[in-house]
Amino acid sequence: MINKEVSNVQKALFGITDHMTLMLGGFGLSGIPENAISELVRLGVKNLTCISNNAGVDDFGLGLLLQKKQIKKMISSYVGENDEFERQMLSGELEVELIPQGTLAERCKAAQGGFPAFYTPAGYGTEVAEGKETREFEGKMYVLEHAFKSDFSFVKAWKGDVAGNLIFKGTSRNFNPCMCGASKITVAEVEELVPAGTLDPNQIHIPGIFVQRIFQGTHYEKRIEQRTVRQKV
Amino acid sequence: MINKEVSNVQKALFGITDHMTLMLGGFGLSGIPENAISELVRLGVKNLTCISNNAGVDDFGLGLLLQKKQIKKMISSYVGENDEFERQMLSGELEVELIPQGTLAERCKAAQGGFPAFYTPAGYGTEVAEGKETREFEGKMYVLEHAFKSDFSFVKAWKGDVAGNLIFKGTSRNFNPCMCGASKITVAEVEELVPAGTLDPNQIHIPGIFVQRIFQGTHYEKRIEQRTVRQKV
Amino acid sequence: MLDKIGIAKRLAKELKDGYYVNLGIGIPTLVANYVPEGIAVEFQSENGVLGMGPFPFEGEEDADVINAGKQTITTLAGASFFDSALSFSMIRGKHVHLTILGAMEVAENGDIANWKIPGKMVKGMGGAMDLVASAENIIVAMMHTNKNGESKLLKRCTLPLTGVGCIKKIVTNLAVLEVTSNGFKLLEKAPGVSVDDIKKATEGTLLVEGDIPEIVF
Amino acid sequence: MLDKIGIAKRLAKELKDGYYVNLGIGIPTLVANYVPEGIAVEFQSENGVLGMGPFPFEGEEDADVINAGKQTITTLAGASFFDSALSFSMIRGKHVHLTILGAMEVAENGDIANWKIPGKMVKGMGGAMDLVASAENIIVAMMHTNKNGESKLLKRCTLPLTGVGCIKKIVTNLAVLEVTSNGFKLLEKAPGVSVDDIKKATEGTLLVEGDIPEIVF
C-alpha cells in the first residue's frame, strides 16, 4: 500500500506558488475543499487561475480568494451569487472564461484520463464556440474541446483512507471525482481519514492512484446557500 | 420511481432479432450476462454483431453462440482461449475486429455519454489505426475513434433494484457499467433484485436511468477460467 | 393570465410516464409539485442526483444534498448520486427525456438566450448549454414579456445565444406555443387572455390557425 | 542464463517506492513475488483492480475477483475495484508508473509486436496497445530468442506492431538492454553468458560499451 497521508493542510499545499492553475471541487458551496481554500488565503499566493464550477459567495468558498485578489482568472460555468466577483469581472480586474458545465466536467475527465481532446455538442453556435474547431458527425454539429492543464487539484471527500481512496457523500460529490488525477498533484481533504483496509474496495469512488496527498480536514462549516424547507403538517 | 423490472429473461430480451448489434459485459468469464446468453442461444437469433471484450471459451459464455454460428462479427480486444472462435476466424466464417481494450471501453462510454468521437493514443502506428484519422496534439499522435452504435446492451450486476440501479462486485464490474445506456435498450441481470430504497443512493455504481429492463437471473455458474491458488503453509 | 404556479401546472401536463426530467431554476422547479396522478417520473439535477424528492423538513437539511439551484432537497426511494461527468453523460446521451428551463429570449427559429447580458449581467450558462444542445425535447417556461413589457418571443435573439434551433415549445403566462419552421404557432391561450393580447406581446411571427383553445390543467 | 524466475527477480529491481505497476501475462506476473524489501508498490490489473495481492488459498477463490490473465487473485488493504473505462484512464493518464509486458519481437527503434501472427495466431492486443501508447516507462520481459532459436531483438519488427517507438528497456534470459537511438545498448549480461552469446542472439544493432557487468539480484 502506497501511503498518501500528510499530517496537515500546510504539508498538503507544499509547492503552491503564484501563477499556478488550480482545480477546485464543489458545486455551489457543497463539497468545496474548505481547508485548502483557507490555507491558500493564509499563504497569500497570487495570480491564480482557478478551474471551479462556481466562484463561491462573497464571504465563503472561492469568494475568500477573490476578496484578497488572489485570483487572476476564473474558469467556471456559473458565477452568480457573488457581488465581489461581478464587480471584479465587469471592471476587468478579473479574467473570466465561462464554459458549459458538462464541458467543464469532461475537460477535467480528459485530463484525468489522458485524452487530449473530445467533441461535444454543448455551445455550438454560441460565443463559447468562437475560435474553436467545429465538426459535423451524422448531421449534428460538435465543438472540439481540450483537456485542462493544471498544477494542483483540491478536492473534498467524505471518507478517505491513507492509500488515498475516496468516498464522497450525496451531491457534494459533483466535480470532485472528475478533478482527481487531472492535475500534476491532487490533494484530497476528507472529513474522516481511516486506515487502509477499512473501506470496502467495492465502494471506493476514486482509487488512491489519482490522489497524491490526503489529510483529514478540520472545522467544516458546510454552509448552505439556499436553505429550503417544508413545514411539518 | 420508474419501475424497470421484468419478470424473466424472455421478457427482458423482447425485440431481439437477427442482424442486431449487441454489447455484452464481462472480462473473460467474469461478470458475463449468463442468463441473457442462454436465452440468445435458445432464441436462435443469427447474424449478430457482438461487442464484447472477449469471446468466452468453447463451451461457455459467447462460445455458446459461436458454436451455434449465431455470430456474424465480433468486436473484441482479446479472443484467445477459444478454439472454435479461432477456427471460424481463420476460415473466414467469422468477421473479427480487434481493437485496443481501452478504446473498446471508451467507445462504449462515448455511446453512453453522447460523445460522437474522441482522440486516443492507443493503436497509433499499428494496423488498428489504418484508415482512421490521426492527429497530433502537443507532439504526440492520436487516433480518432467513434462511439459504438448498438441495439441491445446485456450487462450483469451483483445487486440491483427495481428502479434499475446497479451495484457490481469485484472485478466482475469491468465493461458492464460502460455498456449501460450505450445501446438503444440496456438489459441488466442481477444476482439479487431488491425493492427501490434498499440500496444506498451513495453507493450505486450505475443509476437506473441507463437501464431499461432489469431481472433477477438464475443458476449463475460463474465459471473460473484460471483457477490459481497457493497452498496454506 | 397564468401566474407562476399556473405555468408550472400547465408544464406538468407535458410529463409522461417513465420520463426522466431535468428542471431548471425558477418556475421549472415548481413543476415537481404537480406531477399528474398515476404516472412515474424521476427528476434529475445536473449537480449529481436522480430521484429528487421534496424539500426537507425544517431541521433535516443536509448541506451535502442539494439541487442545481443550490437548494436543500431530499431524495426518494430509488434515488442515486453520481459525479458531474456522469450527470452530463445522462444529458448529452439523451437519457434525460425532457428539459424545462427558463429563458430571457426565444426566437422563432428555436434559438434561446438565457445566460448573459453583455456588460450588465454575466452569471454564466451553468448546465444550460449542455442541456439545450443535447435534449430532443426542450420546453421553455417564462413570462411572455420582460419587466419593461418587451416581448421575449422574438424574430431573432438579441442576447448571446445559449443554443441554436433547439427550442420546441414555450409555456408563458399568456400562452402555449410551438416553434415551427414558419414561426411561433399558438397552441393554447391562458384564461382571460385574447389572441390579440398574445399577438401584441409577441414580436416574432405568430401563427394562429383556427380556434385557439384555452389552457386547461 | 536466467530462467523465468531469474528474469522476474531482475525485473523486480526496476520497482521503485511509490510505483503503481501494471504486469502483463506470463513472466511479468511473477515479478509481484519479488518486490524488494522496504518499498511500497501497488499492482494494477486493467480488468479493474488496484492493490492486487497473492493468489487465494485453495477454497477461497472468487470468480468475481480475477486479474487480467483471468487468474483468481486476492486484494490487499487499500485495494479498490473500478470499471474498464476508469482503469484505462489510469493507464492513458500516466498514473501507472511502470508497465512490464511480454513480446514476440522488439525492434531497435523501440517498436514492439506481441498480438498477432497473420494467418496463424490472432489472440488480440487486449490492453497492450493502450499500455504501450501511454506509459512513459515500459519494460519488455521475454526470452532473447524464439522457440526456433531466432532472435526476438530485431532491426525492424516483422509482425504487426503493438506500438511504435515505445519500448525503453528489455530484460531477457541473456541480458538487460536499453533501447537507444543507435540500437540496443547492452547494460548487463546474465550469469554464464558472454557478450558474444548475446551478439549472436541479437539480430538488431547491439551496442557494447566498456565492461558489461553481470546481472545481480
Image: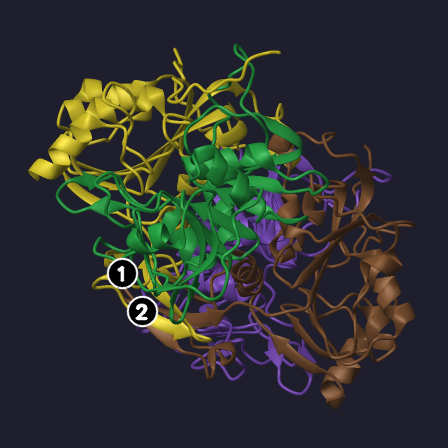
Chain colours: A yellow, B brown, C green, D purple
**Residue D45, image x and y in percent?**
60, 50
Q: In the displayed structure, does residue C123 sit left or right of residue D168?
A: left
Q: Earlier in the sequence, mark 1 or mark 2?
A: 1
Q: Residues within 10 Å of mark 1 (few under 14, many from 20)?
A: some
Q: Is residue A124 visible?
A: yes
Q: Is residue B60 visible?
A: no
Q: Are marks 1 and 2 in contact (CB under 8 Å)?
A: yes
**Residue C186, image x and y in percent?**
44, 59
Task: Name the subunit of mark 1.
Answer: A
How far apart are labels 1 and 2 at the CA level? 8 Å
Q: Secondary structure at mark 2?
A: strand
Residue displayed at 20% across by 17% down: A42
Q: In the displayed structure, does residue B219 sit left or right of residue D200?
A: right
| Relative depth, front residue between D16 and D176 | D16
Q: In the displayed structure, does residue D77 sit left or right of residue C73?
A: right
Q: Which mark is residue A129?
A: 1
Task: Name the subunit of mark 2.
Answer: A
**Residue C61, image x and y in percent?**
51, 16
**Residue with the mark numbered 2:** A134
